[in-house]
């Protein structure tokens, strides 16, 4: 009886197979638009193309495609090996983007305090700080497994088997499902735990629900103290000599200045897992004009701040910021570009706008909520997996506490974020 049951399980698992596709445009026509979150601009083809065209961190990208097999392909030897495009076959059930980091620099993804402690190691033995990692999900945004259905456990087991096989083949010992919302990770958790993964809280995302009415209505909904602060910041920017703020569709001529201001911010950043470059910015600009705007602050004609905003459906994202720290505080540049982005998103009919996992205090003052996010992590080696399970959660918890400051004790919202509130998300 036990042998019969085992054979049945093996037969069920054999119905599913994974394959790696190198490039979003090599996926079957229409697949990305069918599966990607429609109101999350970070998941647009343009953003993925820009990532693939640039050198912002990973050495490579891929898309792990899960299919339900009829058995013939498996017998012919097709599986989770690398490929330029998907093989013909049954309908795709799910797509999981992956980012390959053969030499991730550990000192670039920890806080400033840890970076100082690691400086002697970096000088004397830099190789010790190189960690090969495979990230699953979206490097720049919230993680998702792209699917339009509830996948059975054997399908998820096959998918995770493909992930771990890829990690072993590419010699990427540590595997991370990055920044998944709690509600989405919950559906994957039994299969993840069965494959040796363990969950760790990640930094929360920030989301502002825009509500009804215009910008003045948004201000009126803020708590009294935040509303007074917002109006004071608006007056500060309006009163700064020669300062003006514009929302630009065409900003190709500004890209060198944009990159310089962005580098000022990254030079002060705690974590630098991804650092945008000129190729990424140019590729985003060359994409669909409806999908991007640059909120730009000028002082006497010179660019002194920007917020790169992306749009899809009813969603907006303030993706990356740049500031001239020479006058950033005195002129209120941070709030100037954020308030302009909120105003534009409201006028464009967006229901929500999301911002990055940094500077939590000012974003909470803007009215943002914290959106709970999680990692799921493992190592392909059992011994190192045990070490990770013991050492990593407290280290990440300490980094999270430092980033959130006084808000560390406040629970993040576990509601489904606005970017997931659509008929396509009911799967």
Image (cartoon, grey):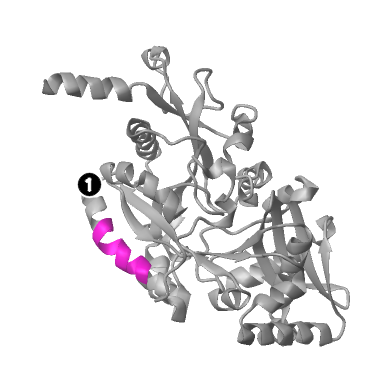
In this image, 56 relative to 144: left or right? right
Quarter of the figure with residue 317: bottom right
Location of mark 1 (residue): 382
Residue 236 in the image: x percent, y percent? 76, 87
In this image, 245 relative to 54: left or right? right
Between residue 269 and residue 372, name the one nearer to us.
Answer: 372
Residues in magenta, as a range: 388-397
Residue 277 in the image: x percent, y percent? 66, 56
What residue is at 36 percent from the left and 72 percent from the top?
398
Q: Is residue 307 above or below residue 162?
A: below
Residue 99 in the magenta stretch? The answer is no
What residue is at 39 percent from the left and 76 percent from the top?
409
Residue 355 in the image: x percent, y percent? 61, 64
Q: Main secondary structure of the magenta part?
A: helix
Q: Residues within 10 Å of mark 1 (few under 14, many from 20)?
A: few
Between residue 153 and residue 43, name the one nearer to us.
Answer: 153
Q: Is residue 418 above or below residue 167?
A: below
Quarter of the figure with residue 163: top left
Residue 139 in the image: x percent, y percent? 53, 51
């Amino acid at each position: 009886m036990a042998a019969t049951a085992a054979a049945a399980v093996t037969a069920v698992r054999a119905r599913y197979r994974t394959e790696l596709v190198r490039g979003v445009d090599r996926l079957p026509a229409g697949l990305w638009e069918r599966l990607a979150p429609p109101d999350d601009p970070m998941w647009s083809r343009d953003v993925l193309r820009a990532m693939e065209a640039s050198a912002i961190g990973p050495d490579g990208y891929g898309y792990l495609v899960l299919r339900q097999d009829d058995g013939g392909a498996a017998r012919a030897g097709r599986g989770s090996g690398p490929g330029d495009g998907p093989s013909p076959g049954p309908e795709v059930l799910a797509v999981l983007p992956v980012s390959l980091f053969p030499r991730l620099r550990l000192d670039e993804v920890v806080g400033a305090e840890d970076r100082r402690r690691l400086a002697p190691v970096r000088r004397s033995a830099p190789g010790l700080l190189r960690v090969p990692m495979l990230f699953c999900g979206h490097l720049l945004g919230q993680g998702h497994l792209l699917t339009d259905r509830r996948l059975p456990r054997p399908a998820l087991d096959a998918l995770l088997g493909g992930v771990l096989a890829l990690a072993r083949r590419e010699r990427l010992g540590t595997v991370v499902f990055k920044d998944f919302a709690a509600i989405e990770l919950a559906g994957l958790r039994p299969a993840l735990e069965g494959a040796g993964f363990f969950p760790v809280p990640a930094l929360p995302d920030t989301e502002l629900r825009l509500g009804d009415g215009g910008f003045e209505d948004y201000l009126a909904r803020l708590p009294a103290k935040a509303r007074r602060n917002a109006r004071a910041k608006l007056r500060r920017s309006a009163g700064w000599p020669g300062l003006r703020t514009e929302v630009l569709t065409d900003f190709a001529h500004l890209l060198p200045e944009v990159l310089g201001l962005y580098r000022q911010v990254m030079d002060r950043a705690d974590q630098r897992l991804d650092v945008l470059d000129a190729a990424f910015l140019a590729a985003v600009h060359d994409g669909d004009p409806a999908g991007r705007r640059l909120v730009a602050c000028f002082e006497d004609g010179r660019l002194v701040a920007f917020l790169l905003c992306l749009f899809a459906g009813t969603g907006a994202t303030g993706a990356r910021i740049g500031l001239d720290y020479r006058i950033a505080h005195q002129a209120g540049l941070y709030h100037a570009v954020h308030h302009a982005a909120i105003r534009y998103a409201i006028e464009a009919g967006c229901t929500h706008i999301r911002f990055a996992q940094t500077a939590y205090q000012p974003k909470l003052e803007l009215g943002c909520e914290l959106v709970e996010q999680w990692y799921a992590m493992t190592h392909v080696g059992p011994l190192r997996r045990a070490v990770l399970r013991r050492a990593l959660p407290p280290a990440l918890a300490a980094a999270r506490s430092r980033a959130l400051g006084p808000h560390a004790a406040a629970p993040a919202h576990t509601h489904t974020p606005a970017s997931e509130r659509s008929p396509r998300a009911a799967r």
